[in-house]
Image: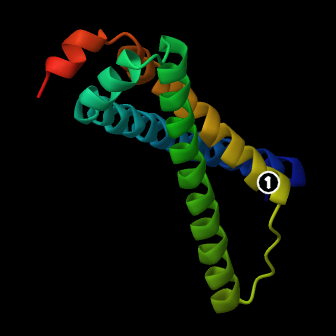
Amino acid sequence: MQSQSAVLEAQAAASGTFTLLLGSIGGISLLVGGIGILAIMLIAVRERTREIGLRRAVGARRRDILLQFLIETGLLSVLGGVIGVVIGVAAGKIVSLVTGWPMLIPWAVALVAVVFSALLGLVFGVYPARKAAALDPIVALRME
C-alpha cells in the first residue's frame, strides 16, 4: 500500500527531473542557436568588408557600423524566435486536434520567448559587430 504523500512525492520527483531535462535541452538549443548567429554574422562581416570600408571612408562612425550589425542580429534572432513560436503553436494545435486534449497558449510566455531570443541574438552579435566596427577603412577597401 502506498500513501497519498508517497505518490505526491514520487510525482514531484518525476516532475522535477522532467523539468531539469527540458531546461537542459532548451539551454543547449539556445547555445547552439547563439553560436549559429555568431557564425552567420562573422561570415556577413567577412563578405561585406568592402562595404564596411566604403561606409567608413565616406564618414560612417564606428558606432554606426556597430549599430547596423547589432540591429541585423537583433532582427535575425527576433525572426527566428517568432518562427519558433509559430511552429510550436502549430505543433501544439496538431497534437490537440489528434488527441482531443484542450490547448492553452500562454501568449505572455510566447512574448518572453521572442524577447529572450532577441537578447540572445544581441549578446552573440556583439563580437561580430565590434569586429566590423574596428575595421580600418583603408585596409577594408583593399581587401578582395
Left or right of residue 31, residue 45 in this image: left
Question: From the viewer's perspective, is 120 left or right of 105?
Answer: left
Give coordinates of residue 118: x percent, y percent.
62, 39
Q: What colouring does the structure picture have?
A: rainbow
Q: Identify which residue is drawn at 31% across, 29% down.
A: 45
Q: Report crowding for label 1: few under 14, some 14 to 19, many 20 or more residues within 10 A (C-alpha).
A: few
Residue at the far right: name it.
4
Q: Secondary structure at mark 1?
A: helix
Q: Disc 1 residue type? A: Val
Is 133 positioned to the left or the right of 136 in the image? right
Q: Quadrant of residue 71?
A: top right
In the rendered image, the quadrant that contains the C terminus is top left
Residue appearing at x 56%, y 25% in the figure: 67
Q: Position of residue 97 (x, y in %)?
A: 68, 90
Classify residue 92 by image quadrant: bottom right
Query: In the rendered view, would you say 107 is above or below 17?
Result: below
Tell whether 51 sits left or right of 7. Answer: left
Residue position marked by numbered label 1 in the rendering? 7
**Quick one: 144 or 10, which is closer to the camera?**
144
Q: How many marks?
A: 1
Residue occupying the point 53% across, 21% down: 64
Residue at image x 57%, y 59%?
84
Please state which of residues 16 and 85 is positioned toward the viewer in this rendering.
85
The image quadrant where one finds the N terminus is bottom right
Q: Quadrant of residue 74?
A: top right
Which is more toward the observer, 17 or 100? Answer: 100
x, y percent for residue 124:
47, 27
Name the spot of residue 62 as percent of width and height, x first: 48, 12
